Image (cartoon, grey):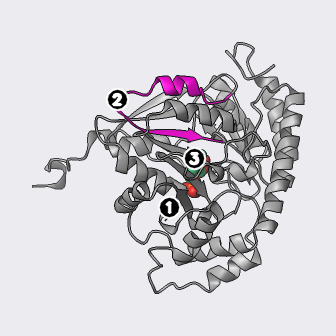
Amino acid sequence: MTADRQPPVRLRPEIVALAAYKQGKPAADDAFKLSSNENPFEPLDAVREAIASSAINRYPDASASVIRTRIAERFGVGLAEVHLGAGSVSILAQLIQAAAAPGDEVLYAWRSFEAYPGLVAVSGATSVQVPIQADGRHDLDAMAAAITERTRVVIVCSPNNPTGSIVTAQEFEQFMELVPHDVLVLLDEAYIEFVTDSTVVNGQTLTGRYPNLVVLRTFSKAYGLAGLRIGYAVGPEYILNAARSTAIPLAVTDQAQLAAIASLDHEDELLERVRALALLRDEIWTALREQGWDSPKPHGNFIWLETKHFTERATEIFTEHGIVARALGADGIRISIGEKESVASLLKASEEVVRSLPSTLENPGLD
Ligand SMILES: Cc1ncc(COP(=O)(O)O)c(C=O)c1O
């Protein structure tokens, strides 16, 4: 039998139908890559040294005990209430798989982090997407109303990727009152360190308060370790044990663990960079508003431009100016806050986009 006469391997149709996770486009040598919400700063020397000292021929410490201890102290919880993963996206996948199976529902705002739909599909559960409000914020009332007997997981993303909007502490508390205690709530705080608004919900202050809440954080963004893949979850021990049971063992490398420890040792220096990025973000947002954009107030390290069906052309215009931005369907463009040197080209491009936007654009995200 020749290979082409063989019946194809039987794969799960819902997986075959699934588009693989799309990464931000690589940038040409002279372009700025502002498509993946990465930190533009080079690693600290201390981080480089930590990585250089790591063991490569040995497996990492599967329990990641040193870095977990540091995080547990910081959050005021026990060691078992902290779980490490190869990026917080790994932990999201683990928790969704641990809680949701075919027939179950996973609820989240949309648009939000583009990995959520794929992670839910892989678990076999069904995504329930609750539209974000016109100003980019989660519609928590609508989310609470969308909870059914089948709901197993609710994801709240603050700041929300890609709109940059936050959920306030008060809004979150009110929301939690409406969520049944047997539904797992994941508070995805990948960008929390960039928030300067004191009304924001902060998972660190909520530990022990809700029996069904897990807070997710990452070293990828503020701490600049995206390439090393390390993130963490803080929550009730038995829930995190279930995540550990679905995890691929030994995925968090020694390099990642040591780099995270070094980052906490030099946190002041890193948070100074975060402050600089937040300031730059606010400057860019102000300039965009002066150009006529009505983009939501950004609280992460990125800005959202709602270019709707003009998104493809708008992305090309950014590329022509040496800016690689992230086009998200026919909804809009997300632009990360990167090198200071990228700002002039970014604003030139955004101005050209504003001028080129067709007047027929429905709800163009413009004043
Ligand atoms: C909202 C959100 N959550 C989680 C992640 C995952 O980050 P990582 O897996 O690098 O920790 C990202 C990355 O872009 C994100 O935007």
Residue 149: give its label.
Answer: 2
Q: Position of residue 185 (x, y in %)?
A: 49, 42
The residue segment tinted magenta is 136-158
Q: Which residue position is annotated with label 1? A: 81
> Which amino acid, mark 3?
Asp
Magenta-drawn stretch contains 151: yes
Q: Which residue is painted at 33% across and 36% down in the image?
A: 104
Q: Is residue 127 above or below residue 6?
A: above
* SS state under label 1: helix
Q: Is residue 72 toward the left or the right of residue 363 in the image?
A: left
Mark whose residue sits in front, 3 or 1 = 1
Q: Position of residue 167 (x, y in %)?
A: 66, 36
Q: Is residue 183 above or below residue 264?
A: above
- Local crowd size for mark 3, using a 10 Å CA cut-off: few (<14), some (14–19), many (≥20): many
| CA distance for labels 2 and 3 | 23 Å
* SS state under label 3: strand
- Local crowd size for mark 1, using a 10 Å CA cut-off: few (<14), some (14–19), many (≥20): many
| CA distance for labels 1 and 2 | 27 Å
Do residues under tags 2 and 3 come within 8 Å of each other at their CB atoms? Answer: no
Of residue 47 and residue 17, the one placed in the foreground of this image is 47
Q: Which residue position is annotated with label 3? A: 188
Q: Which residue is painted at 76% across and 72% down in the image?
A: 266
Q: Position of residue 245 (x, y in %)?
A: 35, 61
Ligand 1 near label 3 (Cβ, under 8 Å)? yes
